[in-house]
Image: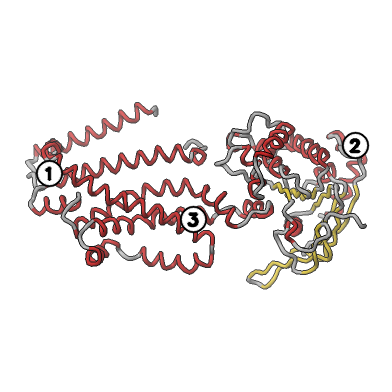
Amino acid sequence: MGNYLIKLRDVEVRYNNRNGGLVAITGINLTVSPGEVVGIVGRSGCGKTTLLKVIAGLVKPTRGEVIYNGSQDGGGFRGIGMLFQSPLLLPWRTVLRNILLPIELRGEDLDKYVGRALELMERMGLKGFEDSYPWELSGGMQQRVALCRALIHRPSLLLLDEPFGSLDAITREEMWVLLQGAISYENYTTILVTHDIREAVLLSDRVIVMGGRPGRIKAEIPIPFRRPRSLELQYSREFNDYIAEIRGLLGD
Amino acid sequence: MPYRVRSASSVLALLVVCTVWELAVRLLNVPRYILPAPSAIALTIVKYRDHLLLNLFDTLLTSTLGLALAAVFSLALSTVLAYSSSIREAIYPLLSGFNAIPRAALVPLLALWFGLGMVPRVLTAFLIAFFPILVPTLTAMVTIEKELWEMLVAFGATKAQILTKVAIPRATPYFLSSLHMGLTSAIVGSVIAEMVASDRGIGYVILSSTSRLDTPLAFSCLLLLALTTFAISKTLGLIERRVVRWAYRAGL
């Protein structure tokens, strides 16, 4: 495949601890195309977060290589947007200043991005909250602020690590719709790490199933439904066949 | 309790304490040089007001100078120590070791080096005050959550940016509240230095008055010191609430 955004070749990560080394993931080969949404599912401790950190350039692989859009150094990783389970907003900054943080860190002109920030906020249902403080908002709203922050600089790669794990089921479904809208609107290449199979199948073009110790890729399941997908899709027969297949791959 | 009721109840408690004290001294015929009655202390303050205020001003001047030095020094040092873990590992044990020296014991040396002027008093205040400010400030700077740190790095933040945009704002409420501890420490430092090596200041007045068995004057000094320290501490508290309102978001 010639056109790829990121490619992992035979990646292994070994964490050094007092008892020698612990291999977290091994033999990972993965290619992500531009505009693709890739879900990574697996049980706790299967190395899926480690894999995400390797892609983010936060962890250097002890073997193999990560090739980002053709360049082989990790320095090209500035164009990443990240969203974690916890919103990680800075309580001393207003919502708007939190959203603009990545711009500030890149030393770009903040004024140029205020308009975009307000537009993102409006799309996320946060209109009018720009001068509020994060702690004045509900958990779901805080996570939407964090999503705006992840998107403000139009990252070439959006990395999501269990992004909605701490939200209630209804809020989580709302976030799925908002996230899917945001991804489709600006065509973000996205990697979504989750242990929620339903979330992975609903949002991804392809689901990577990880398992074992050390963690390996056990299967890759293409999810052919056209995006954007409606929430009703989760009640369809085909959708649930995918869920059952992936659930089977994860074992007991 | 509403604020008015609360302050009324503490005024009442104060009145009760003073009345019991006054009655006990009068009924038990306690000599003035052992324990003066509150009324005697009040009269002494009025009688010697110029002398007392002059010396109180002196003590406050040296202790606030010492506190200001300690605040600036602690903030600068914690920033350096937070930035470089190798400098931190080299210097922090030295600082802890220095903190184990009773600073009061250094006053004669400081007087030997710097004479009997303001310098040894300011330095004693500084030396006692800086550690209680440094420790919480530094701790707040170096305990940024791992996820937040990783997110900032993924957004392309440099170490210096993490320090200025996250570590320092995060440490501000801890720094400001440590100034309360620093303030009382600095006053202790000034008073000790005045007792050991000075001919002015509240410490000197206490020392000379007790040597003449003028206990009411010594008590006047204690009362004035307590009142001014209380007032400065309250003012600091007000500034704190304004500057770092976000840190009191839970409303406790």
Most foreground residue, B148 or A187:
A187
| 1 or 2: mark nearer the eye | 1
Asked if badges 3 and 1 are on one and the same chain, I answer yes
Instruction: Tell me which label, 3 or 1, sits earlier in the chain.
Output: 3
Q: Identify which amino acid the numbered label 2 is placed on.
A: Ser
- Mark drawn on residue A236: 2
Most foreground residue, B35 or A205:
A205
Left or right of A55? Residue B184 is left
The 10 Å Cα crowd at callout 1, few under 14, some 14 to 19, many 20 or more, is many
By what rule are the colours in the image chosen?
Answer: secondary structure
Q: Identify which amino acid the numbered label 1 is placed on.
A: Pro
Residue of label 1: B216
- Mark drawn on residue B207: none
Q: Which residue is situated farthest in the bottom direction here?
A: A20
Where residue B175 sits in the image (x, y, percent)? 44, 49
Q: CA distance from mark 3 to mark 1?
A: 44 Å
Residue of label 3: B139
Left or right of A63? Residue A235 is right
Rendered view: A234 above or below A8? above
Determine whether the residue tagged by mark 2 lies in a helix, strand or loop: loop
Residue at horizontal 9 percent and vertical 48 percent from the top:
B214
Q: CA distance from mark 1 to mark 2?
A: 89 Å
Residue at horizontal 22 percent and vertical 67 percent from the top:
B112
User: What chain letter is assigned to the residue under label 2?
Assistant: A
Q: Identify which amino acid the numbered label 3 is placed on.
A: Thr
Rendered view: B9 above or below B182? above
Determine whether the residue tagged by mark 3 lies in a helix, strand or loop: helix
Left or right of A138? Residue B42 is left
The 10 Å Cα crowd at callout 3, few under 14, some 14 to 19, many 20 or more, is some
Q: Can residue B15 be seen in the rendering of this structure?
A: yes
